[in-house]
Each structure stands twice: as C-alpha cells, then as structure tokens.
Image: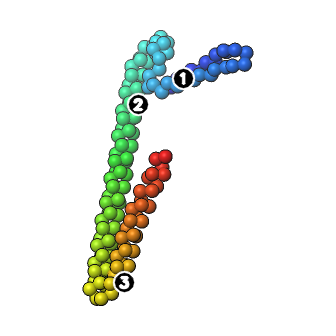
Amino acid sequence: MKRKRSVQHKSPTEYQLSEEHDDGILPDILTISEYAKLDPSAPKFFMEAAKSEQDFRHAMNKDAMKLSRREQALIHGINYLGLTFAFLIGIAGMAFSYFLIIQDKETLGSIFAGVTLLGLAGLFVRAIAPKNRNSK
C-alpha cells in the first residue's frame, strides 16, 4: 500500500494538495529490487504473498456476492409472499361483499367492497411511495 502526497504552491495564497493511494498487492519494482539485493529470495516471497493475497480477495468478493444474492432472493420471496396474501385478502373481501349482497344487504356489501378495494390500493400506494421518495 503506497501513499504519495504533494503540495503545489500556485500563488502566495493558493495551495493545491493532492494525495494518491495505491492499494496494489505488490510493492513497486524499485522496492523489490532493493529487497532482492538484501535477500535473493525476496522477489519469490513477494510473488507468493501477492498470489495468496489475491486469492483471499477473490474469496472474500465471492462470499460478499453470495450474501448479496441471498439477500436479494429473500427480499424477492417476501415481496412475492406479500403480493400473494394481498391478492387472497382482496378475493376474500370481495367474496364476503358478494355474500352480503346476496343476503339483501346491498349497502353494507357495497361499502365493504369499496373499503376492501381502497385498502388494497392504499397498501399499494404506500409500498410504492418510499421508493419514489428515495429516488429523488
């Protein structure tokens, strides 16, 4: 991991600070050659360490992607289950309204059907509204 900072004096009152961060696995070639002068097996050690570090990073990335896929599948399953129950509640509400209307309670059956439809529409609007607020 290398960091490089530089300060440029553009004018007596203006400075520009720039910072560079390199998260490379291997050190630069000059550093490796200096280590090779001290220990001839150092470049081989750096290569082996870089390979094991890269394998570790790939494994961690794979695990993170697996967790992300699981989370997305869980959210999809919960959404599908919610839609299924909303559909069943809507059908049951409409069937109960039909039953009330057959029993010569047209006003009560019609009101119950309207409340059922408005409730389902309200659930849908509330489910969509947070997504729209977050996208702004």
Q: Amino acid at mark 2?
A: Glu
Residue where numbered disc 1 is placed: 20
Q: Nearer the viewer, residue 51 or 6?
A: 6
Q: Amino acid at mark 3?
A: Leu
Q: Residue furthest bottom?
A: 104
Mark whose residue sits in front, 2 or 1: 1
Q: Position of residue 129 (x, y in %)?
A: 45, 56
Residue where numbered disc 3 is placed: 108
Q: Is residue 94 visible?
A: yes
Q: Earlier in the sequence, mark 2 or mark 1?
A: 1
Q: Position of residue 40 (x, y in %)?
A: 43, 14
Q: Earlier in the sequence, mark 2 or mark 3?
A: 2
Q: Is residue 88 left or right of residue 42?
A: left
Q: Is residue 100 left or right of residue 16?
A: left
Q: Is residue 35 visible?
A: no
> Is residue 53 shown above or below 89?
above
> Is residue 69 shown above or below 18?
below
